[in-house]
Amino acid sequence: MTTPSANPATKSAAKAGSGPDMSRPILELDHIHKRFTRSLDMAEKVANLFGAGLQDQVVRAVDDVSLTVARGEVVGLVGESGCGKSTLGRVIAGILEASEGTVKYHGKEVSKMTGAERRATDLTIQMIFQDPMASLNPRMRVVDIIGEAPVVHGIIRRSEIDGYVSEVMRKVGLDPTTRMRYPHQFSGGQRARIGIARALAVNPKILVCDESTAALDVSIQAQVLNLFMDLRRELDLTYVFVSHDLGVVEHISDRVAVMYLGRIVELAKTEAIFEGPNHPYTRALLDEVPRLDATKKQFTALKGEIPSPLAPPPGCHFHPRCPFAFDRCRQERPALKEVGQGRLSACHLNDTAEGNPLMKANAPSVTS
């Protein structure tokens, strides 16, 4: 689905602003792994006594991801369902602890923080979830949904909750007189704004947006994206924007990280990604973005099935579906390394004598 362009003036102002401070990252991810393990139950352990050979099941949801985010920047995380982008977002927000690796905020390792410093950092990084009806308590009024955390953490006193919530609601385009209503009494777009307001109520610096516009109509999507841009400029916010919708990511992001089966396979500025992708998987995703032009195009799904994260293929995870794969791809994991100014890619094609065919103007479509 192609997302309509938001107000160009708003987009321009949001993109320009004072600009991201690239000199010092606000957020650093260093070799992040996240594994989910299902241990053997009693029956399976007994079966092993008779030679069944069963083992614990391990899902490698995030597999060695390193990433830096500058203050004021918007980094888009894209990829197919199951690629690990939402799990990575939850690790960044502190909802899940990394199995390995470190998350740093302003150069300090979050897992080593304690007491007031850790609580302050947890408030500084907030997450906005995909489905407001699943993340908003249906038994709580909006005034309590938005105002509970500021009261609990001492940002405001209980007596100040009405005025404070009204101010936050105005900031996200909601009518403060509706603050005594319940979530089901609002439309989908309004519920999305309530989720944004709840995150903003604790004065965050980083927002992790997990498919925050996926369930909205196209026109409402554009309004919410404009809201994100306005808030970025007004509150000096930094975003990690998780989405499968490349139209949305192109519209709002400064840089894009493409994930496949738990790994980042390409990272570059948004314009560079959309004008000339380097990795075959990125090219395949872009080939299937609907475009409003007169050219006839037959859309074909990316060939092959996504491998199971329980038993990912050796070497490059994408090689079973890649038409350019050769022997090295099946044996050796490609490192995510610089292949151009500001562009990182994990593809062995960049090391071949012929060069990467995708960087040539007449490169064939991956899905053709």
Image (cartoon, helix red, strand yellow):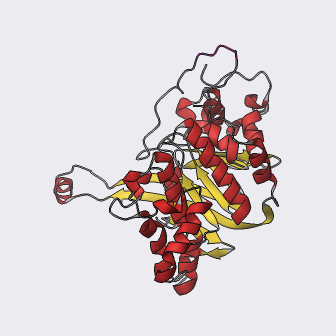
Q: Could one spot residue 33 in this view of the protein? A: no
Magenta stretch? 294-298
Number of marks in the rendered image: 0
Q: Residue at x 70, y 55 (%)?
A: 230
Q: Residue at x 46, y 81 (%)?
A: 158
The front one of 13 and 121 is 13
Q: Main secondary structure of the magenta part?
A: loop
- Which quadrant is home to the N terminus? top right
Residue lying farthest top? 296
- Which quadrant is home to the C terminus? top right
Where is residue 80 drawn, in percent x and y?
52, 39
Where is residue 284 drawn, in percent x and y?
62, 30
Q: Tell me which corner region of the image, top left, top right, bottom left or bottom right, holds residue 246.
A: top right
The front one of 165 and 132 is 165
Residue 296 is a magenta residue: yes
Residue lying farthest bottom? 115
Residue 107 is a magenta residue: no
Q: Could one spot residue 228 in this view of the protein? A: yes
> From the viewer's perspective, is residue 275 above or below residue 58?
above
